Image: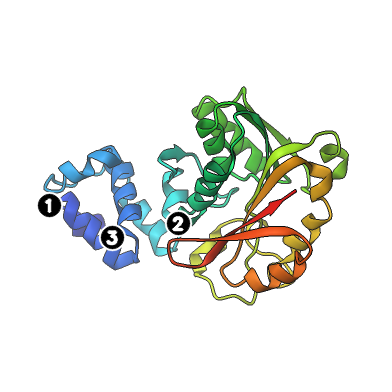
Amino acid sequence: MVLNCWKEKTISEIITALCKTYNLSKSDAGDLVSYVTGIPYNKLAFSHHTKFYPRIDFVSILRKLDKRIPVAYITNRREFYGREFYVDESVLIPRNETEILVDTVLERVKKENGLILDLGTGSGCILLTLLKELNGFSGFGVDRSYKALKVAKKNALKHKMDRKSFFVCADMFDSDFFLKTRFDIIICNPPYVSENDKYEKSILFEPKEALFAPDNGLFFYKKLLSKLNKLCKKDAIVFYEIGNTHKKDLELIYKNEKIEFIKDLAGHDRIMMWKN
């Protein structure tokens, strides 16, 4: 699609056209228009009748959309829990449903200070959000991807959390690191998509190691179970994000454990809590 097709259009018309042409959500289309025009996202509502004037090469943006490249990788940003985080192709794009993980931690944790462990931290958005909300806590983010940790550290600096957050390049099952420290809160949004699941093709632009897991997506939940007692302080809580079909399997895997499931806004079981 050529730029001439978009000339003389208003911002509102461009957002509508992007949604229809590329099947974008309104928030993604708005974020893209904000990125292209330089108008802050929160001011777009007051600019709907403003003429669309791209400040960067809009044709190249459209070509990326034609290839189904996710908007967050085009703009290198994604909002999570009301804050903007830097993202690129080395990390998973933060999802709205993952905000329920943050909500659950904030609702259930009563301590005023302590130590958080984020397994598979990626962009660091979950850990850094919790550190912003829980002032007395500090935390470790662990990821096996050095490139992902560069993104997490960039976000820590962006949100002035670099003195409260520490990032370690390691496998989450590396006991040589974990056995030295015990934690009050553990959060984990592990890869849980099975290769047999139906999924949108656009997710194939995201790092596969952050998405897909063997054993019908249950591999990490099974393997972490044997590590939890070594990682947790007394009365610690572990919060997992889970796939919406995993509850029955996880009830069997954790049948001798203290667990609880939390539903998301769509009514799917989305969070599993494990208590020490």
Separation of residues labelled 3 and 2 (CA atoms): 13 Å
- What type is the residue that disc 1 sits on? Glu
**Circle 3/circle 2 CB separation < 8 Å:** no
Rendering coords of residue 117 (x, y %): 69, 40
Residue 226 lies in quadrant: bottom right
Separation of residues labelled 1 and 3 (CA atoms): 15 Å
| N-term-proximal mark, 3 vs 2 | 3
Give the mark count. 3
What's the coloring here? rainbow
The answer to whether 51 appears left or right of 106 in the picture is left
| N-term-proximal mark, 2 vs 1 | 1
Which residue in the structure is indicated by mark 1?
A: 8
Secondary structure at badge 3 equals: helix
The answer to whether 36 appears left or right of 74 in the picture is left
Q: Dividing the image into 4 quarters, which one contains the N terminus?
A: bottom left
- What type is the residue that disc 2 sits on? Pro
Of residues 51 and 193, the one drawn nearer to the viewer in this rendering? 193
Of residues 119 and 69, the one drawn nearer to the viewer in this rendering? 119
Which residue in the structure is indicated by mark 2?
A: 70
